[in-house]
Every structure is written in structure tokens, then in C-alpha cells.
Amino acid sequence: MLRVAMYESSAIAHLAAAHLREHGIMAGVIDGSVSVVTGALPSVFRNGAYELYIASKGDEELALELIEQFERDPPEIDPEWEDHVAPDLSMLDKKLIPNCPGCNWAIMAARPLGPCQRCGTKYDLLEMIFERHGPEALAPCYETEAPMAHLSDAEVCAIAIDCPTCSYPLDGLGLRGHCPECGSSFDRRELFNGLIGH
Ligand SMILES: [Zn+2]
Ligand SMILES: [Zn+2]
């Protein structure tokens, strides 16, 4: 994997990654806020904690061109966008949805903020679930489908990626196997999911 850019905004970083993927380059974002070194590069886009990675250094030249193109005409993002990414409540485990605190009727996930249609009690479904079952109960509402799930094995195999251990290009080596250079095992889908899933 090769880091090709850094961004302040998670949203911009993910859009940049999507821009690269649209052009056939496997790319993803890693939140590097723990280990970030800032201030070295001039553009505001490049002084952030969200690191844009590509899977294969063979794509570096094209990736840098695409990033330049992306940054010349960046998308407009509401700075609060990330705070407003709403959980998908239809993914909630139905068993975890409590009853109305007023009349004990079943609460509908589609009405997370009440008021209860029967007794008028106001409630906050997310808060109730959070209190009773902890934040992990809400995790499925934020998870997206495995990013490569819609691609066939052949399509996944066609995407360039380097060995995560020694950077040897794994072109033409199938979905999973061992790196011919260092012997590490690899699984393309897992590598890509790890790269995009952040
Ligand atoms: Zn009620
Ligand atoms: Zn290797």
C-alpha cells in the first residue's frame, strides 16, 4: 500500500478515494490521526489525519494525476456533514427495540424521536437503545455492505494490489494465495475490504 495524499476531512478523503476507484485504482482511507505529522505540505488538503492509500504502487502516477484533478475542483462539503450521517435504523435488531415508556406499545424504528402515536409520549429511540444495550447495539446501523461484495472474483482479481508485507505486485496471482517473493498469505477481498472499510 502506498500513501498518496492526506486530508483534514474524512468526507473529502473518502470522496477522493471514490474518485480513484471510479478510474480503476483501488484506493481507501485510513484514519491516521494517531500518528499524523502535519504542516509539511502546502495545500490545505494535504495537512490532515485522513490518509488516502492506493493498493498498488504501480498505479502511483495515474493516482497522483487523478488527485490533482480532484483537488482542482473539489466537491462542496457541508463542514457538518460528518456529524449528520444518520444511522440506518432499519438495520437494528428488532429484539433490541424497546416499547414506548408511556404506554408500553411497540416503538417503530421509523419514528426514532416519537412522539408515540398512541399516548403522545416523547422518546429518543437511539438513546434508549444506547442506555440499555450499549453503543455496540447500534453498530449494524452504521456498517455498510462489504465494499467489494458486488464484484465477481474475476473482477477482484483484475485489480492491482501489492503484497502488504513486501510490496511485491500480486498481479495475476488469483484471489488468494501466497506472495511469491516473501511467502505471506494474501486474500484480495480481505485486503480490499480492509483498505476501503475504514
Ligand atoms: Zn406510548
Ligand atoms: Zn510479499
Image (cartoon, rainbow, N blue to C red):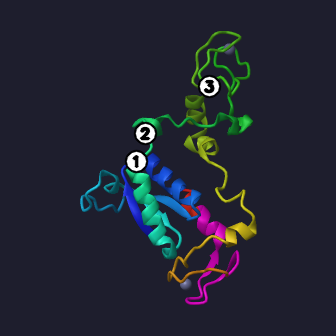
Magenta part of the protein: which range? 173-193
- Is the CB of mark 2 within 8 Å of ligand 2? no
Describe residue 141's horizontal placement relative to residue 39 as left or right: right
Q: Earlier in the sequence, mark 3 or mark 2?
A: 2
Q: Quadrant of residue 69?
A: bottom left
Taking depth in this image into account, of 92 and 172 the one nearest to the observer is 172
Q: Quadrant of residue 154?
A: bottom right
Q: Which residue is located at x 69 percent, y 39 percent?
A: 91
Q: Earlier in the sequence, mark 3 or mark 1?
A: 1
Is residue 178 a member of the stretch shown in magenta?
Answer: yes
Read off the residue under disc 3. 112
Describe residue 69's horizontal placement relative to residue 193 as left or right: left
> Could you tell me which secondary element the residue under label 3 belongs to?
loop
Describe residue 68's horizontal placement relative to residue 177 as left or right: left
Q: Amino acid at mark 1?
A: Ser
Read off the residue under disc 2. 76
Q: Amino acid at mark 2?
A: Glu
Label 3 Cα crowd, 10 Å radius (few <14 / some 14-19 / many 20+): some
CB under 8 Å between discs 3 and 2: no
> Could you tell me which secondary element the residue under label 1 belongs to?
loop
Visible residue check, residue 31:
no
Taking depth in this image into account, of 137 and 36 the one nearest to the observer is 36
